Amino acid sequence: MPSEIITLQLGQCGNQIGMEFWKQLCAEHGISPEGKLEPFATEGSDRKDVFFYQADDQHYIPRAVLLDLEPRVIDGILKSSYKHLYNPENVYISKDGGGAGNNWAQGYHQGDKLSEEIFDIIDREAENGDSLEGFVLCHSIAGGTGSGLGSNILEKVNDRFPKKLIQTYSVFPMTNEVADVVVQPYNSVLTLKRLIENADCTVVLDNTALNRIATERLKKATPTLAELNQLVSTIMSGSTSTLRYPGYMNNDLISLISSLIPTPRLHFLISAYTPLTSDKTESEVRKTTVLDVMRRLLQPKNAMVTTASRDKNITHCYVSILNIIQGEVDPSEVHKSLMRIRERKLAEFIPWGPASIQVALSKKSPYVTTQHRVSGLMLANHTGISSLFDRICDHYDKLIKREAFVENFRRLPMFKENLDEFVDSREAVQQLMDEYRAATRKDYINFGNTETTQES
Amino acid sequence: MSNFLKSIQPTLNEIVYDITGLALSDRFNPYKKLFEDSIVHRSNINIEKCKVEKNYQGLKEKYIIHAQDKKADLLQFLVKRFNNRPILDHSPESEFHQACLQLIISLAQRPLEVKLDNFSDLVQEQIEEATFDWPAYLLGNQNEQLVASIDWNEEESIDENDDDDDGNHNKLDSTYLQNNDSEEVHIESKLIDDIEQQNYSVLDREIISSYWHQTLSDGVSPSLRDFALFWDQTMIKTTHLAYRVNSQTLTEYILIRETLWLLMDSTQLHIYAIDENNQMRIADFVRLCDVTPVAIQDCLEKFTKLSNQLRLANQFLKDTHHSCRTLSSFAQALQEQINLIRFQLADVERNCLKQSCTYTVLSFHEELDSLGIISKGICIERIFDQISFYNNKSNYDLTLELIHVLYKNLLMSEMINNLIFFNFLLPLFISSCRTYLEIIQNWLVNGFIDDHFDEFFIKRKADIHVESIDFWQLSYTEQVENASLIPKWLACIVPSLVKAGKCAEILKSNGVLRNNEESQSFVGEFSKYLQEHFNLKNISWNPLSLLNKSEATHNIKTLHNQFISFQLPFDDDDDKKNSFLALAFNHMETPKRSLLDINRQQLSLASDINQLTTIECILQNFSQEILLTRSNQLIDQLTNDILNRMKYLKHIEYIRDFFLFENGSFMHQFALRLYSKLSQAIHERLDAFSVLVSFDSTLTMFGLDKVTYPLSVIYQSSNTPSTIQKYIIQNVELKYDLPKELFIIIKPEQMEIYQKCFAFVLQVKQAKYVLDQLVFSEFRLKSRLRNQRLYRHQSYHLHHEMFLLRARLLHAVNAVNNFVLITFHTAGEQFVEKHSNKSIDIESMIMFHEKFLTALSIGSLLQPKQQAIRDHLMKLFEIVTIFARRWQLGFDSIKMEHITKLKTEFNQTKQFISIVLKPFLPRMIDSPLRALACSLQDDFYSNV
């Protein structure tokens, strides 16, 4: 029914985090892996129809499209207990099954070839709802399918549904160690350009930070991929909880993110979640208050993105903050907590505009028991995210300088003639970083102006 | 016939026929009977006027026979006069009566020596007096000699039917007309038939019945009785009976009997004292006391006092115009108590008659005291001292005062541990409370105060209808001059009671209240309660009933009346053993416990009064357990009705969902439709049609049935559009079908507040919506078309300005949006939370709802002081909509001036709001407005 959101899961990573997301949603709404409503799920105050629709036999089907160029992950999903959850028509695996080979250009090219089939699915899904609000894209920006095919689809979705919101959950690669995929920086920069230009909002999920959090918070020496995906699904389900449990405010996605994003490009959001505890260690259970949760959310160690608070003589700051507080919370507590945050100067804000901490209160699922009274999710627009792009660009610059591994790209149509796309993408990312840095300054208000004057 | 009677029979006959000169064959039975009666058991009580008259006639005849015609005439005349004149206290008439009596005494003692000089003047005065046709009378044709115009004559009533007449109490104060001729014939014929066979049983019966029905005391002139008494006395003196007693004893005996009469009648009475010269005069007690010992004087004074006390009660009872039910009920109870006293007195008198005990004045006083009559007299005096029934007080005050006084005395009697007081007062108190309880009962069962006499201290204002707005506040008022008069046990539940009464009325009007049979009667409960707790005292409730039991004769049965259960079954004519005389003489032979003993015993029985809970506690318990429980039941019933049947909270939830947008789904969608409609047609206004269509399509979307859904929407297009607010959504109204039963809590005009809240939220949400919709998709599209150079483009700065203005507007609108919705939500949550409390009732529901509304009106800035903020918020919203329109018209058409203008306006508006809100900032108390003030500050988190 109202404000439907279609989830597009792309590539290995996208499908894995997507899977976790749907598991979480099913648990929260009391839907069985087969899509049937559990007998205990009698409380009807939730809105399942944002992310699900009902088949004729009343079983719930996720508004999800599963896309991959190789069958491994999706096959895994279809062999799991959730195999009957998805609409099989929405599962698309490229016929040749070769995958994108961690090549952005390959994935992008495949997207051009397969777009007709893919958009058959997406269009059908979009027409399925009364008032589609937007798309959520789950992918990683480092691989081939998620980044390349994802970029392609992102562009096409933006063209086809210009008025619809596009939010992406983009997993950024580890930057602190040598990745198994050497062309990661290329893929990332090329994808970043599409994210800058075509997405309304990108929730950045930094693998580095996720690993760090998993290690530190969950006390795991070597966190498994599933555990990392669990973290991501927590973020995803948390950020959509106000949509699924309608309250007196923030009943659609747009109202959540509109205030987070002041200008078109500054839409890369960092996220944080607290409290994060490994499953059943009772000693880990804390007493949670709204202030406590809010304070923790502002701590960099809880952020799912590793950002530097200072780089190149720039003090980074928050552009805007949205806190989604889940649990039994008295609204008056929120105000008190905000006052404390103010007194303690826990957050540094942009100098050129209104400092905004939005707080959305959300109900908790009645079917999922949590040890904590209050939990919180932060989505924040922080200029420090530019340091993440900086690191990616750093790697990219080093690679492109030697034109390393570009041959794989030259084989595909987009790069056959020249490598302009690389340059363009790099420039777009640079502009983004420049704008983020400019946003830390008071004269950001003249941003466009100064550019012009510099030009002239 | 007893031996005694047999023994005196010849003497009796001798006296009778000697004096009257009649022969046995004359069968002049009443005459004979009178004499017999007087002699044998001194039953002057039973004297009928006509019989007495006949006696005189007989005497007169005798004079004539003896050639004393003049004396005979005089006697006849005197008798006439005597019969025609009631005796008044200390009036010249009394002297005449004295004279008359003196003559008769003289005549009786020494008929032939009486000088007539003293009376000649009287005769001359009264020459015109009628003569009595004695022969006609003797032959039975006495119809024409009806004695007319005699006040007390009319009341004369020895009534054969009285035994069956239960309502005879009424006769106390009603005039009772009876044709005495027919009765005379009746009695005569009967007596003629069986005079020989009857051994006084008929006679006894008459005597006794006259006791029980108090007819004598009213019907017979006291003077006549007095006369009879003395005649009787004289007769005894002149005869030679075995039981003749010395004169002192006799005086006391008479005195006691007089006192009894006095107490039993207590209207007019005279003691006729006979001095040494056999001269007779009227003596009052005090004068009599001059020659009596001090102890006796005391007693006599007490008798006088007692008679006065009883007279107070009688006077009150005779006043038939009891203005209200409580007074009538009280009067009835009092009557019963007085009756009880009378029966006790009659019992004493019976004992006198039976000679079962011989009283001296002192022992008589003791007897009265042990019977509790003296105490009761004091009680009566107290009550009538403390209440004045006769000045024109309103009924409710009088009633309250009565109950108050009774209760006060009851408490006091309990405190001083006076059981007699207590037992006397308790029935009075119960019956006085009766009407109250009935009214309350009626009220709680039927939902209205049935108070025709205006005696209840709570009054229903007639002009306020149950559905009226002010019903809860104004419908019932206490109408008391002095609220402290309300007894404590009742006063403490009055608030609950009033509440319950209102609840009952509401429930009644809602058709929920049914007169179920199980609803207990408070009156019944009340007396049951008291009885339960005074179980022991129940024995002593009525000393006479105990007495009856102890007599162990089967002639006493419990009556229908629980307080007075005393009746002698004299209707058994045939059983001669049951005849009163037979009984009396039997009892003379068998010794039995004296009344004193019995009383002592029962006092000791009841002496553990202290071990029982006090009356205060009991009443407290009663009011707590019965009245309060019932009240609470009703209050709960209404609460349940409202909460469960009327689904009050469901309605509130709906109202919150609809008017306050609490639930995001339905109203959100509806509003979105309106907003998108508005933003689609840029220059068009909203019209009723599109509003209705939006609403219907929202209903359809949610699969709701338009007909059954409690919500509908109205659009009132105003002809004079406001110049300031061009684009802000207005005039959309919701219509929610609230059951009118709930008007008691949610008043129709309070729906207006909801309406205003709704209008405001709609506007706030609109502002938020139009800003939220300003995503950058258009910009993205353009940027790609312009080949990535957009940011370097000349126009980007303009766009950038717009983006930043958007952010600022969004920030402000978000702050307002948060403020409004959080205020609503918090108020709503608190409101609902309060209702989860179990002790909720209608009153608190009303209160909570009012508080809720106050919070809402703060949230929607409806308070008068907030008007300025509201106005400027409207301006802000207008700026927002204009800005959004410009944005959507396309980036190309935007000029820097537009942006600058909007920016300036926005800055001004925001500055104004900030200034107005500034006073809230430093406050330590968290208030929603402070939150708004804080969040409106741009640099709030950095400017510490």
Image (cartoon, coloured by chain):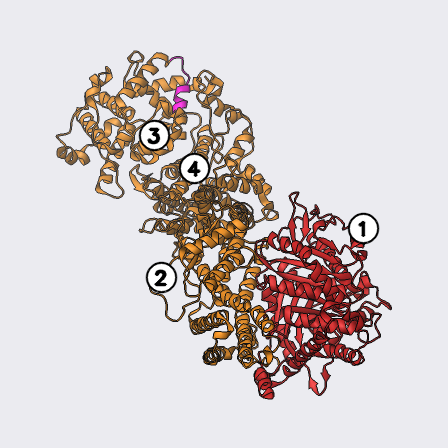
Dot 4: few (<14), some (14–19), or many (≥20) neighbours within 10 Å?
some
Q: Are marks 2 and 4 in contact (CB under 8 Å)?
A: no
For the residue pair A195 and B835, the one nearer the viewer reads as A195
Residue A47 appears in view? no
A351 w.r.t. A188: above or below: below
Image coords of residue B6 (percent x, y): 44, 17
Taking B421 as reference, is A22 left or right? right
Q: Is residue B847 found inside the magenta-colored segment of the image?
A: no
Q: Which residue is mark 4?
A: B336
Query: Tag count in the figure?
Result: 4
Indicate the chain on which mark 3 is placed: B
Q: Which residue is mark 3?
A: B234
Q: Earlier in the sequence, mark 4 or mark 3?
A: 3
Q: Which residue is mark 1?
A: A79
For the residue pair B650 and A117, the one nearer the viewer reads as A117
Q: Earlier in the sequence, mark 2 or mark 4?
A: 4
B389 w.r.t. B74: above or below: below
Chain corresponding to orange in the figure? B
Q: Is residue B201 found inside the magenta-colored segment of the image?
A: yes
Chain corresponding to red in the figure? A
A53 w.r.t. B519: above or below: below
Indicate the chain on which mark 4 is placed: B
Q: Looking at numbered disc 2 in the image, what kind of residue is underneath it?
A: Ser
Label 3 sits on a secondary structure element that is: helix
Dot 2: few (<14), some (14–19), or many (≥20) neighbours within 10 Å?
few
For the residue pair B162 and B76, the one nearer the viewer reads as B162
**Label ID, residue B718:** 2
